[in-house]
Image (tube, rainbow, N blue to C red):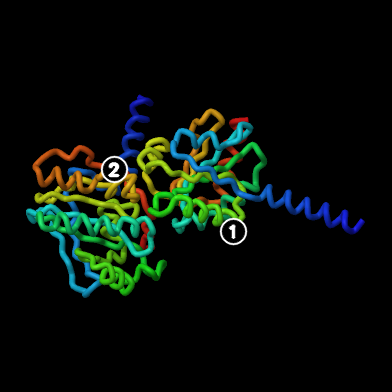
Amino acid sequence: MRAYVRFVGLCLSLTAGTAAAATLIEVKEPAKIADAFPRQATIRVLNVWATWCVPCVAEIPDLRAISAAFGPEVAIVGVSLDDMIPGDRASIKAEVAGFLDRNRITYSNIYYSGTSDALADTLRFSGEIPITLVYDRAGRELWRREGKLDRKKTIAEIRKLLGRNR
Amino acid sequence: MRKSFALALLLLLSFACMADELPVGAKAPTFSLANAVDGRTWSFHPGDGKVSVVVFTCNQCPYAQAFEPRLIEIARQYQPKGVVFYAIDPNDEAVYAVESVENMKERAVSRSYPYPYLKDGDSTMARAYGARVTPHVYVIDGTGVLRYRGYIDDSARPEERTKTGLTDALDALLGNRQIANTTTRAFGCTIKWKR
């Protein structure tokens, strides 16, 4: 019986571990970033960041809180720009994956390996990170915040947008 | 009436948003800043007849660090052609100790910067130029007019570089040709503004 309980406990912890693991997909074409959002997500939050960006790292707890504040109707996808720093791509990608794990980031992330110009053209942003953009299911931009997020204001804004777009 | 009011408001707002961006074609701001290496003041008087490159950069930003060898290479290549380079660190050392003058000096000396590394301790010049990130580059012609603003190259990975914004602008200016892309999007680390 005790062994069975231990076995169930082990299974549960493995399941929890799997559920908590962050995904990191490499994308080179900015147009494919939208594919990372689950179909059922009504509100899609895109956060462009990098491990070397101080304000980006500072707002990770806020993004985790935003992610936790909503159900599957709201999906967050991070776009890491760590590839912009020269070096072995596989090693940098592994470092980003390790960073996601260490920081308990469970929302999906993209390892962007395309050009900065293409990304800035697609997202229509200045190149300054972090930037957070909110889209509806059809990919229409609803809101954006350049610079570090304000947790309460962002949650309130998403709640409002969710109400309008259900 | 309502439509023209809305249009005027939109126009006003767009000007307000752009107010801190020094537009290409504008007269570049003058500065006098201390070189972290020896404390000497370097003064830039736009319109002194020389093509000048002003680069906002810093110690801490990995993206600025990634472009450092490239900037040194470009400076060494264009200084013999009469181009003057100024590197400016606009980050607030009170918030980020790594941006102290001592650390700037260490960096500049250890890497043999071929240009002065100036401290813009209160971020005044970064605001005047409308710099947003490090590295952010400005090319000023001999009459003191801003002719290019943006990135050094479109990629810090030499093998993936497809656009060379800074050297294209310099080649065009030195060759009396029009600069094809006068503005590009500078990526990098947000400037740590003096509060």
Compared with B50, B162 (above or below) is above
| Residue picked out by circle 2 | B184
Compared with A161, B119 (above or below) is below
Tag 1, which chain? A
Percent from the top left, x then y, of residue B47? Answer: 10, 53
Tag 1 near tag 2, CB within 8 Å: no
Q: Nearer the viewer, residue B69 or A36?
A: B69
Q: Quadrant of residue B70?
A: bottom left
Give me the residue at 66% from left, 50% from top. A20
Q: The residue under label 1 is which amino acid type? A: Arg
Tag 2, which chain? B
Percent from the top left, x then y, of residue A16? Answer: 72, 51
Percent from the top left, x then y, of residue A5? Answer: 87, 55
| Residue picked out by circle 1 | A102
Q: Nearer the viewer, residue A155 or A104?
A: A104
Quadrant where the C terminus of chain A lies? Answer: top right
Q: The residue under label 2 is which amino acid type? A: Thr
